[in-house]
Amino acid sequence: MRNFFIFISSIFVLLVTACNSPFVPKEKGYANFKFPEKTYQSYNAPNIPYSFEYPTYAFVDNQINYFGENKSKDAWINIQFPSLNGTIYISYKKIKSHQLDTLINDAYKFASNHSNKATYIADSVFTTSKGVHGVFFNIGGDVATAYQFFLTDSSTHFFRGALYFNTTPNADSLSIYNDFLFKDVQHLVNTFKWK
């Protein structure tokens, strides 16, 4: 019985002394990433029906393999951001007769595919100063892509892009990266021209 009393007393002393330390709240942590300076270069490849400007801290990958099919001959490209672990996936279609509505509906479906995780999906129609028409999708929440867009001349060309990061979607963690690249996506759209 004496050993039991010593054991209980020891536990009580440990609990009392352990509880006397002051409470220190955990500080909020943010990613410490130094973003590169925003400078741009031109993408104007031969045999490609469009041109635009993209950041100097990115590179264009035109060797696109889509489900085993080589899409580089179809003017598909990826704009890679190695330091940010992100990619703007770009597809291009030459519009066939009565195909524009189908391509636009497909673009809306690609955006709405994220509705099960999205807190909102906002779309905005625009026309750039260069006469390029399009729709920009801003998708909120823990989604795989925060920004999607398409550009068209409404008769011949259809260009679609979507920004993805090679990581698990987390809106809080990715918000600073999405905000940073939003300006680059805007710059791409605003400098976009059909050839």
Image (cartoon, rainbow, N blue to C red):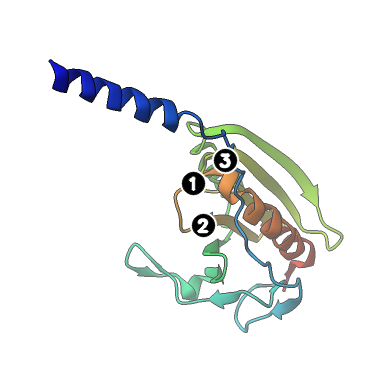
Q: Secondary structure at mark 2?
A: strand
Mark 3 nearby-residue class (10 Å; few <14, some 14–19, many ≥20): few
Q: Mark 1 — residue?
A: 169
Which marked residue is nearer to the observer: mark 2 or mark 3?
3
Is residue 152 in sight in this rendering?
no
Residue 132 or 78: which is nearer the viewer? 78
In-image side of 153 versus 171 (left or right): right
The mark that comes first in sequence, 2 or 3, is: 3
In-image side of 57 versus 96 (left or right): right
Q: Which quarter of the figure has residue 16?
A: top left
Question: What residue sits 44% from the left and 71% below the top?
Answer: 64
Q: Determine whether 38 is above or below 189 in the image.
A: below
Mark 1 nearby-residue class (10 Å; few <14, some 14–19, many ≥20): some
Q: Mark 2 belongs to which amino acid?
A: Phe
User: Contact, CB < 8 Å: mark 2 with mark 3?
Assistant: no
Q: Mark 3 belongs to which amino acid?
A: Lys
Query: Where is residue 108 drawn, in percent x and y?
Result: 58, 40
Residue 23 or 89: which is nearer the viewer? 23
User: Contact, CB < 8 Å: mark 2 with mark 1?
Assistant: yes
For this orientation, the residue located farthest to the front is 2
Mark 2 nearby-residue class (10 Å; few <14, some 14–19, many ≥20): some
Q: Mark 3 — residue?
A: 26
Q: Determine whether 142 is above or below 69 in the image.
A: above
For this orientation, the residue located farthest to the top is 1
Q: Secondary structure at mark 3?
A: loop
Q: Determine whether 156 is above or below 108 in the image.
A: below
Q: What's the mark number on residue 165? A: 2
